[in-house]
Image: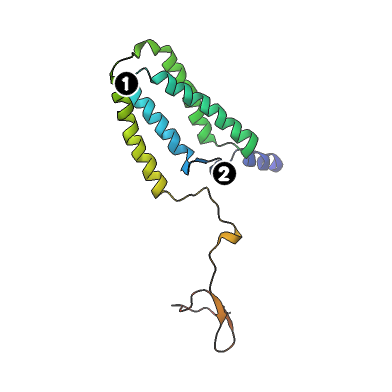
Amino acid sequence: TTLLAGRFSKAVDCTTVALSPWSSVLGIPLPTWGALGFWLILVAVWRRSRWVLPLTLFSAVASVGLLAIELLLVRSVCLFCESVHVTSWLLLLVVWRMRHQFTTTKRDVDTFLYGLIPAAGLMLAVYFAVPPYWKVPTWGDTPPIPTGVTQEGKPWIGATKPLLTVEE
């Protein structure tokens, strides 16, 4: 059972997915893109816009693409991501059944602006405020640590003027 648990934990690991090079697009994490998409869908539903069906269709198709990336390239899946993918498909099903309630009106331009302006603000805030957590530093990426020799000839590492000195 330990071998099975080890294989399962490697196959279902949100951290592996979140830290993969596929976890961001244009420097913005995929969950932020998903939040943008769901925001646009919400605004389109609220405004009864004809954009609801194309947006939900794009969301569902994108979820299949992301699942393929997880399975084929990352070789691990995230349960939270999969719940969002299932939600995308369920949302598409609901919107498809209600598609006749969404009409083409002049409000579609307003819908686009209502949805896009806050979304653009969110994307810019994330781009500039969220550190790139998916870029895991390697040994060569660490900043150089000061080293030297004391007047007594003992090697030191750390701050040049430390507040605390630990001797071994």
Q: In the image, what residue type sits under mark 2? A: Pro
Q: Which element type, helix, strand or loop, lies under badge 2?
A: loop
Q: Position of residue 90 (x, y in %)?
A: 47, 21
Q: Position of residue 47 (x, y in %)?
A: 30, 21
Mark 2 → mark 1, Cα distance in angstroms:
36 Å
Sequence-wise, the earlier of marks 2 and 1 is 2
Q: Is residue 6 above or below residue 82?
A: below
Q: Is residue 22 above or below residue 162?
A: above
Q: Which residue shows up at 54% across the image and 89% down it?
A: 151
Callout 2: 10 Å neighbours few (<14), some, many (20+)? some
Is residue 164 or residue 162 the one in the foreground?
Answer: 162
Q: Quadrant of the C terminus?
A: bottom right
Q: In the image, what residue type sits under mark 1? A: Asp
Give the residue number, with chain letter if any, for mark 1. 108
Q: Which element type, helix, strand or loop, lies under badge 1?
A: helix
Q: Residue furthest bottom?
A: 152
Q: Which residue shows up at 38% across the image and 25% down it?
A: 41
**Mark 2 or mark 1, whichever is nearer to me:** 1
Q: Is residue 23 above or below residue 56?
A: below
Q: Position of residue 45 (x, y in %)?
A: 34, 21
Is residue 162 or residue 44 the one in the foreground?
Answer: 44
Q: Position of residue 162 (x, y in %)?
A: 46, 77
